[in-house]
Amino acid sequence: MRHFFLAFILLGCLSALLPGCEPKEDLVQTSGSLSFVQDTVLFDTVFTTVRTVTKRLWVYNRNRGALKTDISLAGAVAGASPYALIISGDAGTGASGLTVRGNDSLLILVRATVGDNGTATAAKQFVVADQINFLTNGNAQSVKLVAYGQNAYFHYGDIIASDVTWKTDKPHVIINRTYGSGAQARVVGVAVASGATLRIPKGARIYSHAGATLQVDGRLLVNDLSEPNAFVPTDTVKDTNANLVRFGGDRLEDFYADTPGQWGGIVFTSASRGNRIRYAEIKNATYGLLLLNTAPTGPHPNVAIDNTTIKNISGNNVSFAGAAQTPIALDTGGGIISIAGDVQATNCLFANCAEYALLGFGGVYDVNFCTVANYPNTTAVRKSASLTFTDKSPLDGVTTLSSPQVTLRNSIVWGAIADELYFNDVDNYRSSLVVRNSVLRTATYAGTAFATAGKPGLADGALGNLLNTDPLFVRSPYSGGRPDYSLQATSPALKLGPAFGSAPARDLRNLPRPARTVGAYEHK
C-alpha cells in the first residue's frame, strides 16, 4: 500500500510536467505578433483643453498560443502626450509584460486632451499626433493616434458686466461654472448682466459644453443691424453661408451633428429687453430660447428673431433652476419656451423638436412667415402639439397668468401628429387669438365656426387657412435624404391668398418675396 501511494505521487508530479496539460491558448509563444483592425485611431475636431470622447482600439492575438507584449505611448517616452490609455481597466500611458491569450483580444480605450498649439489667433485646425507602440517577441508594431485640434475663446462661467462684442477669428466655447454652494449655488456658462449688451457679429461660432447656457439679464444682439459690419446680404443665404452665426454643442464629431440636448440653450430672464437674433442657426440644445419671466405681472422679456433656424431640440427632466432668479422646473424642452415673455418670429424654421417648437405661458407672440416642420429625429412618439399656448403658470398648472396674445399668420405648422396646434383654455383669450392665411395640421380645430366654445374653427373661410393638406415639402425626413422644407411646385400652399398683415421683403434664404409664398421659404 505504501509503494502504491508513492507511485501515485510520482505519477502526479510527472503529469504536471507533461506538455499539453496547460491549455495551448495559455502557453506563451516565443514567436508571433499581434494584429489590429485599424492602423489609426482618429478623433474628429476637438477644442483645445476639452477632453475628447473615448475611442476603442481592439488588439487581436490570432495565434494559438499566448503572447506577451509591452505597450507604450510614444509621446509619453518623450515626456508628454495629449493622449491617455485605459488598458484592462487600468489608466496610464502603457503596460509591460501584458499577456494576450491565444485567439483572444484586448480592448484599449483611448482619449485625448488637445492643448493650445501656441498660435493665439489660429482659427484653422491643427493636427496632434502620437502612436501606441507594441513590442511582442522582438516585433515592433504601432497604431497611430490622430486628433484635429481647434483653438477657441473659452468662457468658463464668464459674467459680462459691460458692453462687449465677441471676436470672430476663433470659435467661442461656453463651459458651466458653479459659484457658491448649497441653496446659494449659481451655475453660470456665460451671463450678460443687467444693463450690459453682448454683440455677436456675423460669422461667429458659439459652441457650448454639456448643460451650458448663455444667460441674458441684459441684451443680446446677434447679427444685428446696429453692428458696424452688419450682415445685410444681397445673395441667397444657403445653409453653408459663412456669415450665419451658429450656436451648437462642442462635440464636433459626425455622430453628434444632429443630436439634440447637447447643451442648455439661450436664456432671457425677467430684466432682459431689446434682444434681437438675425441670420442664425440654433441647434442640438435642450431649448433654443427660454424666456424665463419669474415676475409675470411685470414687464416682459422680449426677443425678435429673423431669418433663423432652430432645430434638433429636446429635453427630458430639465431643471432651469440654475438660470432662474427663483427656481422653476419644466420636464420638457422646446425650440422656444416662453413664460410671460414676448416673441416676434419672422422667416424662421423650427424643425425636429421632440417636445415643442414653441411653448408659450402667457406672453405675446407674433409668428409671421415661419415654417414649423416637426418630425423629431427620435424613436419616441411625440404627444405634444408643436405650437402650444396656455394662460396657466408652469409652476402649478393652475394659477392664471395674463392671457396670451397669439398672432399666427402666413405660416406652415406641420409635423408628425394630427394636432400640431393647441390652445389651452382658449375661451379665456379667444379675442386675442389671430390665426390667418396659414397651412395647419389640426384635428381639434378643423371646424368652420370660430365661435365654437373651446374649439375655434380655424377652417372658417374668412381666415384663409388651409387645414390638413400636406404642404409638400421638397424633402421631409420620411422622404429619405437630408430634409429640405422649401415647397414643391405642386404644393397647395402656393394657392393661398395674399399675405395677411405685414410681409418681409425677403425670405429665410434672402430670396425676394414677390408671390408671398407662406412659410419661411419663398417658392422659386
Image (spheres, rainbow, N blue to C red):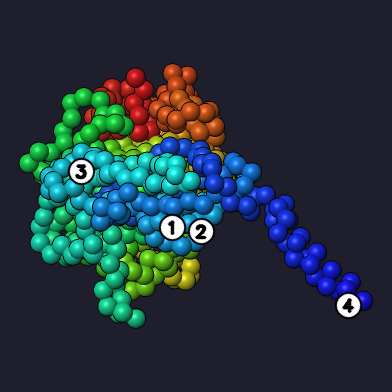
The residue that mark 4 highlights is 2
Asked whether disc 1 touches disc 3, contact meaning CB atoms under 8 Å apart, the reply is no
Q: CA distance from mark 1 to mark 3?
A: 44 Å
Residue at numbered disc 2: 88
Can residue 522 be seen at all in this image of the molecule? yes
Residue drawn at the location 27% of the way across and 78% of the way down? 180
Ranked by sequence position, the earlier of labels 1 and 2 is: 2
* Tag nearer the camera, 1 or 2: 1
Pointer 1 with pointer 2, Cβ within 8 A: yes
Residue 387 lies, in percent from the top left, at: 45, 48
Label 2 Cα crowd, 10 Å radius (few <14 / some 14-19 / many 20+) = few
Q: Mark 3 or mark 2, which is nearer to you?
A: 2
As drawn, the residue found furthest toward the front would be 3
Q: Residue at horizontal 71%, vertical 52%?
A: 19
Residues 114 and 376: in front is 114
> Of discs 3 and 4, which sits in the foreground?
4
Q: CA distance from mark 1 to mark 4?
A: 50 Å
Disc 3 from disc 4: Cα separation: 92 Å
In the image, what residue type sits under mark 2? Answer: Ser
Q: Which mark is residue 429?
A: none
Closer to the camera in the image, 384 or 39:
39
Mark 3 residue type: Ala
Judging by the rendered image, the residue that carries numbered circle 3 is 204
